[in-house]
Image (tube, grey):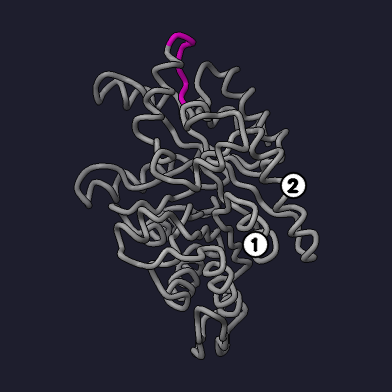
Amino acid sequence: MRLGVMIGAERGDSARKVTKLLDDIEWAESVGMDTAWTPQVPNDFDALTAVALMALRTTRIELGTAVVPLQAQHPIALARQALSVHAAANGRLALGVGPSHHWIIGDMLGLPYERPAAFTRDYLQVLAAAFSGPGPVDVENDNFTVHNPLDLAPVGPLPVLVAALGPVMLALAGERADGTVLWMADERACAEHVVPRITKAADNAGRPAPRIVAGIPVCLCAPGEVDAARERANRILGEAEVSPNYQRLLEYGDARDVGDICAAGDEEAILARFRRFADAGVTDLSVRLLPIGNNRDELVASKRRTREVIAALGAEVR
């Protein structure tokens, strides 16, 4: 199982965000992390721009987006941007995409959120044609009519992973993509719902075994602090309450919320949780560092302790 870490722009002015982003990716590569996953949140940095910045400070680590909402831009625009970033990264981009949620696409952007699976299928058809270049991209389907010249070509394999939570999207990810990027999926949801469905779809389509990237919060803490860590996870990461897609995914597992999915405790507890995800068929873990504390200094110290342990556990789970 590959071990990766979520790295994204944090609070502060834009110049400080860039400095922090670059510091974090330099740390991740220096300690041997396999992948860094950059979320695309509605109110912050563009994920692919962040990947391009991180690519210039690194040489080895894979750089992924988790995930770029599809409805926000035309597939040719996304393909052009992804191919450019992939070249800047010397072939290290993993493009995570997805149809997002109604509260982002509809409520924030004012765009239609209808038949997201069908929209994603049509979008992936255009991306596949663009990534097979260089050459003209000629695709006509229910959502897109594209006849666009494109002189760019991938500098190496460019994996596309789809955020897939329900049965239809998992089948689509297996048939048309290289895997899936998950959030709010615990071990049982992965083992009994995600892995069988996406693997069967990939096998039926004659595609290689898919990558299954599970995102989980992680907090190194004393046993008596586990409840506090889970409460903090629910407070700052609790998207499920406004996202029916996540609510339905939780029903496939034992977790009631993101706090239950959080790997919190000492080093042995965190390692045991990692191994359960590996046993469930997860190919990649994407760790969201979750510090706890009563002030900034305590939060910074907690984050540093957690990431040191994560780095040390890498050899145990690979």
66 left or right, relative to 103? right
166 left or right, relative to 308? right
Whole-number angstrom distance, CA of label 2 to CA of label 1: 13 Å
| Residue 46 appears in view | yes
Does 82 sit above or below residue 186?
below
Residue 267 covered by magenta stretch:
no
Q: Which mark is residue 291?
A: none
Q: Nearer the viewer, residue 189 or 14?
A: 189
Q: What amino acid is labelled 2 in the image?
A: Pro
Among numbered discs 2 and 1, the one appearing first in the sequence = 1
Q: Which mark is residue 172?
A: 1
Crowding at mark 1 (Cα within 10 Å: few <14, some 14-19, many 20+): many
In which quadrant will I find the N terminus? top right
Count of numbered marks:
2
Q: What amino acid is labelled 1 in the image?
A: Leu
Q: Quadrant of residue 285?
A: top right
In which quadrant will I find the C terminus? top right
Q: Nearer the viewer, residue 236 or 25?
A: 236
Q: Position of residue 57 (x, y in %)?
A: 42, 53
**Residue at 46% of width from left, 27% of height from top?**
259
**Residue at 39% of width from left, 36% of height from top?**
237
| Residue 4 appears in view | no
Q: Position of residue 102 (x, y in %)?
A: 40, 56
Q: Which residues are magenta?
A: 219-224
Residue indicated by mark 2 = 196
Badge 2 element: helix
Q: Quadrant of residue 230?
A: top left
